[in-house]
Amino acid sequence: MSAREVKPLGARRLRAVRGLVATFAIVVPALMIAAPLVAWASGQPLRWVGSTQEQLGPVWGGSGATPAAVANYADRVIWSAPGASPGWWLLSLVPPVAGAALIAVGGRALWRLLGDVGAGEPFTGPALRRVELLSRCVFAYGLLVPLLELAVALFLTWGHQVETSFYYAIPPGYAVPVVVGLVLLVLVEVYRRGLALREDAEGLI
């Protein structure tokens, strides 16, 4: 297969990937914001995960008096407020709006970066800034969104507990964007150094 046959195929694939990125960056943030708004407008109760209760599970007995193993089960506690005020609803929108904004900004940066690749200019200053913006958005999503969810859940739960106790488990899935963001930040630094070396080499010619 000749180079002339490969290039159009690569361009089509790149356009398809850019289309998927654009769709993701538009549809996902819209759904993240629309879902709670629809629930609010339709009169559904406001729901949030407020705490986790640990329950002692079945005991596997050994030969001695002391059990060989004890299982603890953690069950999520879902709070439901049918008469939630508009202020509560607006407060509950803070985490999804922040997450949607980060996805939209990061998706746009990735979309423009793929455009740079298609134009044959992946190693330029603007492309570097887009990679850096993308990495910061990914890292912030994994770190900021769960902290906002924690703060909102703490505020909403505080006035409804008989005893002042609160425990919130951050979903482990949020660690993935944090790790990916850190890896991208390292690659950004490598990218920046490589770009600087390229500019120095071009200046010597």
Image (spheres, helix red, strand yellow):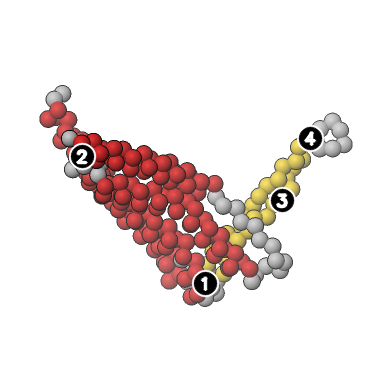
Foreground mark, 2 or 3, reads 2
Q: Element under label 3? A: strand
- At horizontal 55% and vertical 71% (from top left) the residue drawn is 82
* Residue topped by disc 1: 88
Nearest to the observer: residue 108 or residue 46: 108
Can see residue 189? yes
The mark closer to the camera, 1 or 3, is 1
Picture coordinates of residue 175, whole percent (x, y):
51, 46
Q: Residue 47 at x, y = what percent?
A: 54, 64
Q: Is residue 31 left or right of residue 121?
A: right
Q: CA distance from mark 4 to mark 1?
A: 47 Å
Residue plotted at (17% across, 35% down): 205
**Which residue type carries mark 3?**
Gln
First along the sequence among labels 4 and 2: 4
Question: What is the secondary structure assignment of the residue under circle 1?
Answer: helix
Few, some or many C-alpha atoms within 10 Å of disc 3 (few <14, some 14-19, many ≥20)?
few
**Above/below status of 62 relative to 165:** above
The residue indicated by pointer 4 is 68
Q: Residue at x 46, y 65 (%)?
A: 94
CA distance separating discs 4 and 2: 71 Å
